[in-house]
Amino acid sequence: MPTAARGATLILLGALLAQAPLTAAASEPRDREYAGPPPTTAVPATEPTAVPSTTAPPVETPTPTATPTASPSRPAGEPPAARSWSDVVKQVTETSPDNPQLRAADTSAQASSIMRCFKLDEENYCLGLGFVDQVPTGAQLQEVMTPPTLRADGDVGVEQDIPTGDLTPASFVAERASMPKSVRVTAELDEMQAAWDGREKAKALRLLATGDQGASATTPTPTTTTTTTPVPTTTPTATPPRSAPTQGTPTPVTPPVNPPAAPVKPPSSAYIMKGFQTSQEKGYWCGPATFQSIDWADDNQKDTQASWAKDLGATTSGTAISAMVKQTNLKTAWPKSAGSYVVQNVSGWNTKTFLTVHEKHLGVYKAPVIEHVQLLKRYFPYLAFNHSGHYQVGRGYDRAKGTIAIFEVFNERRFNSRGNVTNGPKNIPASALFNATLANSFKNIGL
């Protein structure tokens, strides 16, 4: 019996020893970086290639959490092209950052969060910047946020004077970042509404700038409606999509307004809005003054600049060009002839394209252009001093002379006794007006 018992004990001990390595291996903590899957497990295409381990035994890991897949031709993190207004609402709402995240971010991160870009069918639109040929990089956004150089070689004795009233990129980002998220999303959707409605116009402008337009490329018309009967503009109170952030399914909006067919070439020269020039009443009211002129010429009713300052959301920091475009679409009939107004970046244009677009808009559609310039003496020699970003009314052109006619709304003498009398009709070389537009950090116009 003692021998049999001893034999049974040895057998039991041997079995326990045989299981010891497995128990030890199972109790080892799992490495943070997995050495690689078992030979029979396929590596997902999105996972990096792992370096084989010579020490750790193969341990089966849980399947990693799935991440949104992106199209091979689209950078990671970039939303797919929006094919409907519902897509736009969803993308804008989901990508708008939370307030704590914005408050903790530095200026560069805030700019990237606020000036987000979206693809509307084929066109790229960035909040604040407008329609762009290419989505800007982080470095390019930082350049946008940098104040422009006011003094050029030869500007001896030309000091910087008062700001005249456009909203700088830094102020634009700061204002949007300070809003409660619900208010900010509403402002973003207001801006995106004009972009969505005007995407066909933006496509025509892009093709014109690249020289790839067809016979009717400069006439942005829909494929499902006739072009001789434009759709009426949306009324100021009809804003159903603005409640989209709190709704599961956004309410559809009215179809985009598109300009009619333009079978004739622009005349060699054209001037509109004769007699509707204004002068801004406050130093930072170039936006309200410009809009007062545009609206006055539309309905022959001269509303006060104070009322337009309220509608445009103008502050002592200035007026956003997106607000100028929004109110043009809501409060005037100009879109009936020119199509929905949009914010259009011109950094990829040249002087010829800039003048050609003005000829089309002013000579064929007979609708004004919202000029957005840096008001510098080297481009506007009637000035005595350099000034800030600024709005003017584009209201004519002369092809033979290569000039664009504007209403200057800023009277320098009114705000500086040493200044010149500068407001009223002016004819500016197209190259000078184009370069003044590029000198502004936003590099965009409204049309």
Image (cartoon, rainbow, N blue to C red):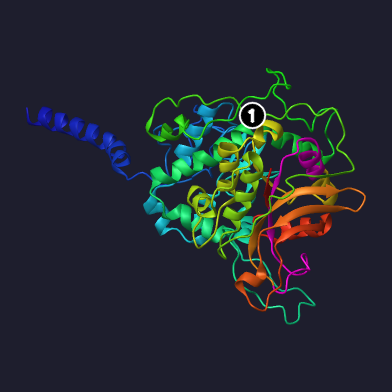
- Whether residue 87 is in magenta: the answer is no
Image coordinates of residue 170 in percent, x first then y, are 54, 60
Of residues 58 and 82, the one drawn nearer to the viewer in this rendering: 82
Helix, strand, or loop for circle 1? loop
User: Could you tell me the amino acid type at mark 1?
Assistant: Val
Please report the residue visible at 76 percent of the width from the left and 77 percent of the height from the top.
Answer: 155
Up-down relation of residue 326 to residue 2 (above or below): below
Q: Quadrant of residue 178?
A: bottom left
Image coordinates of residue 228 in percent, x first then y, are 74, 21
The C terminus - image quarter = top right
Q: Quadrant of residue 265?
A: top right
Image coordinates of residue 22 in percent, x first then y, are 31, 36
Of all residues shown, which one is farthest toward the left?
1
Of residues 167 and 423, the one drawn nearer to the viewer in this rendering: 423
Q: From the viewer's perspective, tell me whether residue 200 is left or right of residue 381.
A: left
Image coordinates of residue 131 in percent, x first then y, are 66, 43
Asked whether the viewer can see residue 65, the reply is: no
Asked whether the viewer can see residue 434, the reply is: yes
Q: Quadrant of residue 140?
A: bottom right
Please report the residue visible at 75 percent of the width from the left and 70 percent of the height from the top.
Answer: 377
- Mark 1 Cα shell of 10 Å, populated few (<14), some (14-19), many (≥20): many
Which residue is identified by label 1?
A: 257
Up-down relation of residue 63 to residue 438 (above or below): above
Of residues 410 and 226, the one drawn nearer to the viewer in this rendering: 410
Of all residues shown, which one is farthest toward the bottom?
157
Q: Where are the magenta residues, as a range?
A: 357-385
